Amino acid sequence: DADVTQTPRNRITKTGKRIMLECSQTKGHDRMYWYRQDPGLGLRLIYYSFDVKDINKGEISDGYSVSRQAQAKFSLSLESAIPNQTALYFCATSDFLGETQYFGPGTRLLVL
Amino acid sequence: RKEVEQDPGPFNVPEGATVAFNCTYSNSASQSFFWYRQDCRKEPKLLMSVYSSGNEDGRFTAQLNRASQYISLLIRDSKLSDSATYLCVVSALGAAGNKLTFGGGTRVLVKP
């Protein structure tokens, strides 16, 4: 079984809708991250968490929110989706050093 | 200027040939360096860390040049299965611990 899972794997939504992307991990890591990937731009960090209830903004947090209610789960919400949030979203975990990251399979989001 | 820059490619490589490509980084305080591999529509996975003295892992050789602020990856005896995008990742110590910055990736296509 995969160590880091994401749901849904694909999602199509309309502008203005609220959606939530879920991430779960069985690696026992405290640190969890949300990235988005756009062609040619690499992965950009949205939010990260070092422990339950700990939330930190990444470089592109506007328009997103997260929740970390348990060590194994980290959810990403788009309060009011817009078309330029169309992207591939990855959740990742790491140990306390934070250097080697383990990624989930990704969620493809299309905002119409 | 991007913090981590890579030639997007694609590098078209005959099977069995050698291919090499670089990644430049702008933060001179960067401490750790990595190559990740990402297959089409899949999540990134750690390929190898890059050490100051250079290191090899089978057919893959990574080098670090701190003076010129670049890292390189060389693939010998290319296999069809080496076709992927290779992401350069640079780690620097920030206020909230290690911060990873991803390059946009270099696409490699190995052809028969």
Image (tube, rainbow, N blue to C red):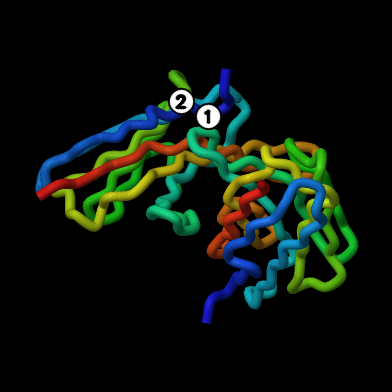
Indicate the position of residue A81 as horizontal and vertical percent values.
77, 47
Residue lying at 77% horizontally and 59% vertically, measured from the top left? A19
> In which quarter of the view is residue B72 placed?
top left
Residue lying at 83% horizontally and 48% vertically, measured from the top left? A80
Secondary structure under badge 1? strand
> In which quarter of the view is residue A70 placed?
bottom right
Q: Relative to residue B16, is residue A71 depicted above or below? A: below
> In which quarter of the view is residue B61 placed?
top left
Q: Chain of mark 2?
A: B
Quadrant location of the N terminus of chain B in the rendered image: top right
Q: Nearer the viewer, residue B102 or A37?
A: A37
Residue position for label 2: B24
Q: Relative to residue B111, is residue B31 depicted above or below? A: above
Q: Nearer the viewer, residue B38 or A98?
A: B38
Three-letter code, disc 1: Val
Q: For the residues marked 1 and 2, what is the alpha-carbon distance in whole angstroms?
A: 6 Å
Residue position for label 1: B4
Q: Nearer the viewer, residue B36 or B67?
A: B36
Indicate the position of residue B33 as horizontal and vertical percent values.
50, 41
Q: Pointer 1: residues within 10 angstroms few (<14), some, or many (20+)? A: many
From the viewer's perspective, is A82 left or right of B24?
right
Indicate the position of residue A74 as horizontal and vertical percent values.
76, 64
Three-letter code, disc 2: Thr
